[in-house]
Amino acid sequence: MVLPWVVLGLIQLVPLAAGAIGLVLPLAVSPASGPLAPGFSGQGQASAVQLLLAQPGLSKSVWLSLTTGLFATALAFAVVVLLLAGWIGTRTLGMLRRCLGPFLALPHAAAAIGLTFLLTPSGLIFRALSPWATGLDRAPDLTIVQDPAGLSLMLALTAKEIPFLLLMALAALPQTRCEDYLRTAQSLGYGRFKAFICLGLPDLYPHLRLPILAVLAFAASNVDMATILGPTLPASLSVRIVAWMNDPAADLRTAAAAGAGLQGLICAVCILLWLAGERVASTAVKAIAVDGARGRADRVWKVVGLSLTWALFALLSGAIVSIALWSVARGWFFPDLLPGSWTLGSWRKVLLQDTGPLVTTVVLAALSSGLALLLVIWILETMSRRQLHNGLAPRESSALRAMMFFPLILPQVSLLLGIHVWFLILRADGTFFGVLFAHLIFVLPYVYLSMAGPWYRLEPNLLRNAQSLGLSDSHSFLQIKLPMLLRPLLTAFAIGFAVSVAQYLPSLMIGAGRWPTLTTESVALASGGARRPAAVYALLLMVLPACVFILATLIPAAAFRHRRGMRHSR
């Protein structure tokens, strides 16, 4: 029972501790004392802070990180609450759940590139409205993308995180009594929204707290989407930290170390503000619950929640269409809705000539998700057997679940900068296995979270019956348990594959530019204005996870096709 915790500590907690120590080393160690941190200046801690504070526009960058994280997370959570309150237990919500797949598989970098093609003054929306509605025959001079307030970045983060939070909420609903509470409250004459806010949400929210905090930390410290959609003068703090890290000036790299510490502080402030908001919201909900109103006039909120969800899904769908069009466009002049001529030149270059990023992405994703799945299977099976041996029903450990969320609620740029220092010390920066390990840190939590539920829902009596018939533990595991869990196993692998494909900072910082992936190349091309090759890379970012998800669906269907006759008809 101790061994799984040791392995998890080595993969999850040790990198976190090493990252924290590595973050301090560049601030406290001078090269005169030894080559502990190559590439960093020998300034002391106060000098590093002074270098950071001397950077122009620092307060604006900090403000952008704070507001982006808090507002994007709050908006995404509000839309999910409106949707659940109005449509929980209906076919509409079931249909929305079936539509989540493509948006969950859409990497953040690809979503940002597609939204750039969609929202810019020369984008698809203005083309669709011109000239018949706008009277424009040339693109207007408007700052929509990369606006100074970061509104386009907040919109993109909100649209991208709604599918994730909605999936987490739908997965947690069976563990709650929300629907029972709603039916009881409605039978007493209360409206759906008041019933959900006062009874259902307090029961559901504890299951959503960790996913929400993960979204909050990501939104406050995001780099790839902020590089493409965020302001540039100044950029958000995380984007500037990466730029300082890549700058040849030693002073700026020292400022980057101090900035990474500040980024961690910003995320901590965001989390504390969110937790304080929970207290305020809890007090408000208690006051609403006892005010005597039935809250029946809630039809407008029901329509608002569904309309906002479909509007944001339509926005992401439009982004996907824009990427597909730009990947094959040769000449496309405003206000033409479609390209005037077409070409596959960019596709030929990526698929036939410059295949390095594609191969690296596929190999990293396959290895990291495969390793993560094997580790998760071993950990879950070891802990389940121990619980059964002790006469307990197998159940998920809350401590294990919290440990899995640790890498997700910390800012990637701070964690990876500290880990990068240790790779420099060990002369292992820029190695393939270093990049693979960095991917595994972030892939493992998602594979575990997607696998734990199906694993513990499996009926343990099936294995007991098999063992009573003479089957050993290993044989019952291989011949009964794994085949019954084939679909969730392949789905977990597909989720891990998609997470690895979307990783930007681990490939950029730990790989030291020697292992370019589709994500790093697409962000570089999009920020440089190369639309056609950026569109090709972005479309591949979507196609690769989609293909793996399709295989995860088809393989179990083919493997168990002989069992279709065993299904009873209703």
Image (tube, grey):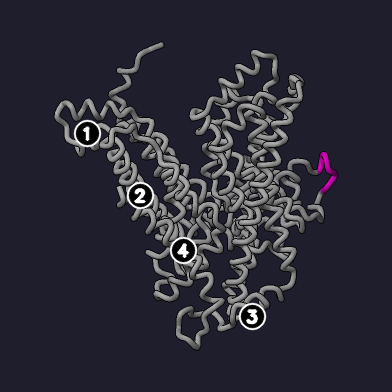
Q: Which percent across, then down, holds residue 410?
A: 54, 56
Q: Which residue is mark 3?
A: 47
Tag 2: amino acid: Gly
Tag 1: amino acid: Ser
Looking at the image, is mark 3 or mark 2 earlier in the sequence? 3
Identify the residue shown where x is 62% and y is 61%.
265
Tag 3: amino acid: Ser
Mark 2 and mark 4: Cα distance apart in space: 25 Å
Q: Which residues are magenta?
A: 131-136
Is residue 134 in the magenta section?
Answer: yes
Looking at the image, is mark 3 or mark 4 earlier in the sequence? 4
Q: Nearer the viewer, mark 2 or mark 4?
A: 4
Q: Nearer the viewer, mark 4 or mark 1?
A: 4
Q: Which residue is mark 4?
A: 17
Q: Which residue is mark 1?
A: 476
State the SS at label 3. Answer: helix
